[in-house]
Amino acid sequence: MMWYELTGKDSDVVVSSRVRLARNLCDYPFGKRLDESGAKEIIEKVRSVFEGVGDYTFTDYSTLDPTVKSAEYERHKISREFAEAKTPTALIESDEKNLYIMLLEEDHIRIQSIMAGLSLNEAYASASSADTLIDSSLRIAYNEKLGYLTHCPTNLGTGMRASVMMFLPGITAAGGIRSLQNQLGKLGLTIRGMSGEGSASNGCLYQISNQVTLGNSECEILTKLTEICEKITEQERSLREKMKADESGRFTDRIMRSYGTMLYATLIDTSELVKLYADVRLGACLGIIDRVTPKTLDEILVRGMPNVITLENRGAVNANRRDRCRAEMVRYVLAGASEK
Amino acid sequence: MLCEKCKKKEATVMYKESINGHKSSYALCADCAAEIGAFDSTKKLISDPFENMNSLFGSLFGLAPYKKSTGVDVKRCNLCGASFNELAAEGMAGCPNCYSEFEDELSATIARIHGSSVHTGAAPAKYMEGREKKKQIEAVEKELHDAVAAEEYEKAATLRDKLRELKSDEGGMK
Ligand SMILES: [Zn+2]
Ligand SMILES: [Zn+2]
């Protein structure tokens, strides 16, 4: 199962948790200094580590259809850079373990695990199991002072980037994102809007991650990030209750109008979907809409992304057809959800 | 190399700027760098955690001491062949070996990114064994010290043997 098909802890506020470990092989250069034959050697070496081990599949990304790659990015399985790379790349993946191992992204190896809800420790455990497997048969670049040696010095040390995707309509509406940014910055954390800056255009989705990778252990980084996300979650919940208490009825009306659009519209473009997602997800979390769960909406958002739509629908050959398929998919998923 | 602006003093700083995506870099003396605000703009970059990471650290690298190059015998990494100036321009290491090859040149940059920290997290298995062994040795050394202080000489002798044993098969590390 993919992360967006599962429900995790604190799913009203936390959409997903992701841990990425950067690893490199000792004897090969990075990036543009690595020639094609070196790149192929690395891919082959890592591939052989996972050969015959459980449910991992190997895909040569160099020859893969760009739509498939972009769809995997939209499903949050791989990075945008990896989807757009022009040099040899490959992916080793296990949907069962929520593990996606990118070969020759910025680093030789980037192990990524993504899980639903607030579950950084689980995601780390999964990524770490792949790390141990790789370490047992390949020489990984490491020194005792700087830790894991990475292409960019910003990833030295643990080589770990942990991030939590949070749904923050309450803090957004209260105008609190900027101040949250400042506070997190002081704690060595960053917050980024999912796409574009500010307000509803990003579906009120924000990614919070650790910035410093050297000096703290993985456990310390994960514990700190988890604690901070728990605090943000509390704050977000209390702001939502205030929104719900609006006596004019405008708040509920806005949410129900968006829900109505999702249920009956026949053409929905991506940016409208993102806006509807934010309203209806908030309504579902607050019990204003009781037939839909936050997880269902996360699934709708992922499946509504342009490349995923193109891939899952034979007829989605142009923007207009995609908008039609997107609206159909939304109606279909919501109908399934309300039958349960 | 002389400062590219005043062409009088020795250049000590690589100043990089990016205007509308057009990147350029100059070798400047400290005075000229201060005059055009090279240091101030860097300070601002450090305090803004939302800047694009690569450009941020590209410019941090750029402010590392600019070494006089005497033409042919520039130091190069023996694995990837990069010189320090190349790394500075790219803001990235050329290979894992660059970190030991250019340890001195990079230390200031790394400290600016991460603070003056040493790695304390996970490590490849063979380093983990080494760490374990080191901890054991330290524990036995302390016990031995205490035993000697308490004049428990028989116990001290046993501990000394244990210590010798631990240290003898330590050689495999590093
Ligand atoms: Zn000058
Ligand atoms: Zn090198």
Image (tube, rainbow, N blue to C red):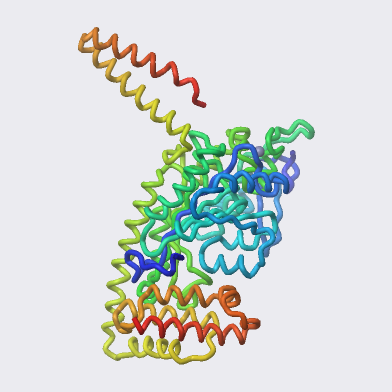
Tally of marks = 0
Q: Is residue B41 visible?
A: no
Residue B94 in which image quadrant: top right
Q: Is residue A297 visible?
A: yes
Question: Residue B120's x, y, as percent?
Answer: 42, 38
Q: Is residue B64 left or right of residue A195?
A: right
User: Which part of the image, by quadrant, shows the N terminus of chain B?
Assistant: top right
Above or below, A170 against A164 in this view is: below
User: Which residue appears at 31% of the width and 20% of the height?
Assistant: B140
Q: Is residue A16 left or right of residue A48?
A: left
User: Which residue appears at 37% of the width and 47% of the height?
Assistant: A219
User: Which residue appears at 60% of the width and 68% of the height?
Assistant: A70
Residue B10 in which image quadrant: top right
Residue A281 in which image quadrant: bottom left
Question: Residue A75's x, y, as percent?
Answer: 52, 67
Question: Residue A309's x, y, as percent?
Answer: 56, 77
Above or below, B39 against B66 in this view is: below
Question: Residue A276's x, y, as percent?
Answer: 45, 82
Nearer the observer, B98 or B1:
B98
Above or below, A91 against B122 in this view is: below
Above or below, A15 against A150 in this view is: below
View extreme (right): residue: B72
Nearer the observer, A186 or A28:
A28
